[in-house]
Amino acid sequence: MAVFTSLLAGLVFGFGLLISGMADPNKVLGFLDLAGPWDPSLALVMAGAIAVGVVAFAVARQRTVSFLGAEMKLPAARHIDRRLILGSVLFGVGWGMAGLCPGPALVSLGTDQVKAVVFVLAMVTGMAVFEWLEHQRLHRAATAP
């Protein structure tokens, strides 16, 4: 059941990205280009997402299990460190260069955009490099005197 609901949530999210136009890199770049003809529609989509998220997290904090019975796993970290800042900068630079972030990039794979294919390949490569570096870091920490 969890796989089905995850698939359904992903499909709803993907359709939302398509309907709102956020899978179109030009629309996103239009929002990020403050010097050109600015397109505020992404801000409205973000405001709607934040409103839904605030309500969802408020409900989630009151529960110990999800509506489907799974354990609630809410983020616990509250500190800002170098890794968070570096990751945020890399995300922002990639978003600004391509007009895509992970969700819209995956949705855009179905629209036959070469830019989306390149972005997803770069994203997967970055994830693999991160996992390798993280493994190396944990290995060094475990074997340090």
Image (cartoon, rainbow, N blue to C red):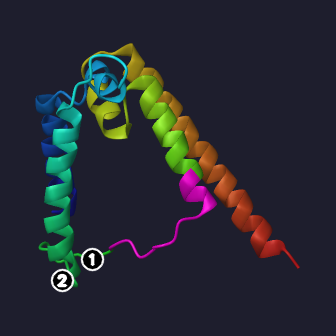
Which quarter of the figure has residue 113?
Answer: top left
Q: Which numbered disc, 1 or 2, marks the residue that appears first in the sequence?
A: 2
Residue 27 in the image: above or below residue 3: above
Bounds of the magenta segment: 74-85
Name the side, left or right, on which 137 lies relative to 7: right
Disc 1 crowd rating (10 Å Cα; few below 14, some 14-19, many 20+) is some
**Residue drawn 22% across and 57% down?**
3
Q: CA distance from mark 1 to mark 2?
A: 7 Å
- Name the residue that disc number 2 marks: 63
Please tell me whether residue 79 belongs to the stretch shown in magenta: yes
Residue 27 in the image: above or below residue 61: above
**Residue drawn 25% across and 28% down?**
23
**Residue drawn 52% across and 30% down?**
122
**Residue drawn 41% across and 76% down?**
76
Which quarter of the figure has residue 19?
Answer: top left
Q: Amino acid at mark 2?
A: Arg
Please tell me whether residue 68 belongs to the stretch shown in magenta: no
User: Residue 55 placed where, x, y %?
Assistant: 13, 67
Disc 2 crowd rating (10 Å Cα; few below 14, some 14-19, many 20+) is few
As helix, strand or loop, the secondary structure at mark 2 comes to loop
Compare residues 69 and 26 and report the one nearer the observer.
Answer: 26
Name the side, left or right, on which 58 lies relative to 107: left
* Disc 1 and disc 2 in contact, CB within 8 angstroms: yes
Name the side, left or right, on which 127 lies relative to 95: right
Which quadrant: the N terminus?
bottom left
Q: Main secondary structure of the magenta part?
A: loop
- Name the residue that disc number 1 marks: 72
User: Residue 44 placed where, x, y %?
Assistant: 16, 40
Name the side, left or right, on which 24 lies relative to 136: left
As helix, strand or loop, the secondary structure at mark 1 comes to loop
